[in-house]
Image (spheres, rainbow, N blue to C red):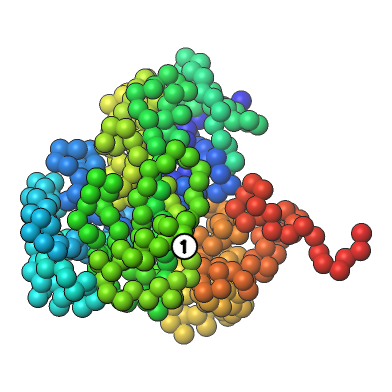
Amino acid sequence: MNHPYDIAIIGGGVVGGMIARTLSAYQFRICILEKENDVARGASAANSSIVHAGFDAHEGSLKAELNVKGAEMMASVCRELGVKYQNNGSLVLGFDLADREALEALLRRGTTNGVKDLRLLEQEELRALEPNVAKDATCALYAPTAGIVCPYELTIASIGNAMDNGAELFTNFAVTGIEDLGDVFCISSESAKVSARYVINAAGLFADAIAAMVGDTSFTIHPRRGEYLLLDRECGGMVKQTLFRTPGKMGKGLLVTPTVDGNLLVGPTSVDQEDKTDKSTTPEGLSLIRAKSAENAEGVPFGKTITSFCGLRAVGSTGDFIINLPRERFVNVAGIESPGLSSSPAIAEYVVELLKDAGLEFRTNPAFDPIRPATHAFREGSIEEKNAMIQKDPAYGRILCRCEGVSEGEILAAIRQNPRPRDLDGVKRRTRAQMGRCQGGFCSPYIVELLAKENGVPFESVTKFGGGSIINFGKTKEEA
C-alpha cells in the first residue's frame, strides 16, 4: 500500500460526491472508491430529480433538518458547479376532505420544519396555475421553494470538482473488506488495497454491508424499486410545477414533473424487494404509471414515451438518515433515501462538523476552486456564440447526436474532463448524447470510436456500462 489517504469515501453517488467536494476545500488527501465502472451508477442515476421543499419529513428528524437546509443551498451549489437547476415549485394535490386534512397537516409540519412560503391553494387558483391538473383536484399544498435538478449531472460535477481540487477516484473498486490497523484502515477490493485514516461509508444500498465490515450491525438497508416513464421533450411544457399526490407509507407517491432538460417524467412505482441489483422494468409497473398518472394530470401523451427505467432507493431500518460514528474514524452516511438528493449539500456539511467533533484537524486548502465550467454552453449558446466555438474548434460543428443536437466537440470535452467516462452510458450522462428519440441508434458507433481513441483502447473493448456489457465483437466482413 502507498502512503495512506487522510479520508476514503466509499460510494460515488451524489452524497459521496458532495462530501468529497466539500472536504476538498481542506488540506486532505482524499480518495473516492466506487464499485462500478463510473460514478452516478446507483440511486443517483435513476430518481425523480426533485429538490423537495422539506414539508414531508417528520419534525425534528435529520431528514427534515438537512432537507430544508440542502434545498436552500442547491441553487448556489448548482451555479458553482455549472449544473442546470430550476426553482419550479411543487404541488401536492388533494381530492377530498381526507386529503385536505392531510395537506393541512403537511402545511403545519413544513412550517415547523422551516419551509418558506408554503400555502394551500383552492381549486380555482390551482387550475389557473396548472391548467392540465386532474379535473377532480379540489385543493393543493403549494411549495414555491421546491425545484428540479439532474441528479447524475450534479453527481458527476461534484466528483469532478473534487478531483480538480486534488481528490482521487478509483472505479471498479468493490470493497470486500476493511481492517482497522490502529492508526489507519486497510480497505480491500478483489484486486487492490488502499489505506486511510478515516473512512466515510456512503455506499447507498450496500452501506449496511460496509458498516458490518467494521462490526456495526445496528441497521439494515433494503431496496425499494421505482419505475419511471420518460417522455419526449415536446411534452415537457405540459406542467410547470411538480405534481404529487398526498404521500403514503411507501413514499411521496407518483409524480408528474418537467425535467431540467425539457422532458416530462412520470413515476415512480414503490415496491419493496430483496434483490439490491434488480433494476428491470415490469409490464405491471409501467401499466400502473399510465393508469395512476391521470390522478395528477389530464392527457399525459404516453405515445411520446422515449424510454423507461427503474431506480432503487436505499431504505434504512431506522426511518431516518443514519449519519454517525459507530466507531472511531469511521462515519456512516446511510439510509439516504428521499429526500437524499435535496439534502446532499447539507449532508456534506453535517459530515464535516461530525469529523471536526471527532478530532480531525481541518486546514483550509488555499488552492480550492469551487467553480466548474458548465458542460452545456454550446447547446444553449446563441448562433454567434456557437459560431465562435466552431471557429475555435471545428469539432463543435459536427453534430453526432441528432436527436439532442450534441456535437463531437462536446463529447470530446466530456471524455477529457474529470471524472473521465470510459463507456457509452458515461458519455450519455455527461452530454445527453443517446438520450433522444432514437436512444443512441445513430450516434453510438461514433461515440464508441471516440472513446476508444481518447482512452487508447481497442474499439471492441468499449462497453455500454462496464462489466460484461460488450457492444462489439469485431468488424463485419473482416477475414480472420
Residue furthest bottom in the image: 383
Specify few, some or many for label 1: CA neighbours under 10 Å numbering under 14, 14-19, or 20 or more.
some
* Residue 212 visible in the snapshot: yes
The one of 361 and 214 positioned closer to us in this rendering = 214
Q: Is 133 on the left-hand or right-hand side of 200?
A: left
Identity of the residue drawn at 33% across and 65% down? 291
Residue 64 sits in which quadrant? Answer: top left
> Picture coordinates of residue 289 (x, y %)?
36, 62
The quarter in which the N terminus is drawn is top right
Q: Furthest residue to the top? A: 182
Query: What residue appears at the point 38 percent right and 43 percent down from the top-left corner?
Result: 272
- Across and down, in percent, residue 429 comes to 50, 60
Residue 76 in sight: no
Disc 1, SS: strand
Residue under the point 23% across and 38% down: 62
Q: Amino acid at mark 1?
A: Ser
Asked if residue 61 is positioned above or below residue 210 in the image, the reply reads below
Q: Quadrant of residue 48?
A: bottom left
Please give the residue where the numbered disc 1 appears in the rendered image.
Answer: 308
Please tell me which residue is depicted at 24% across the width and 60% down the height of the picture.
244
Left or right position of 171 against 249: right
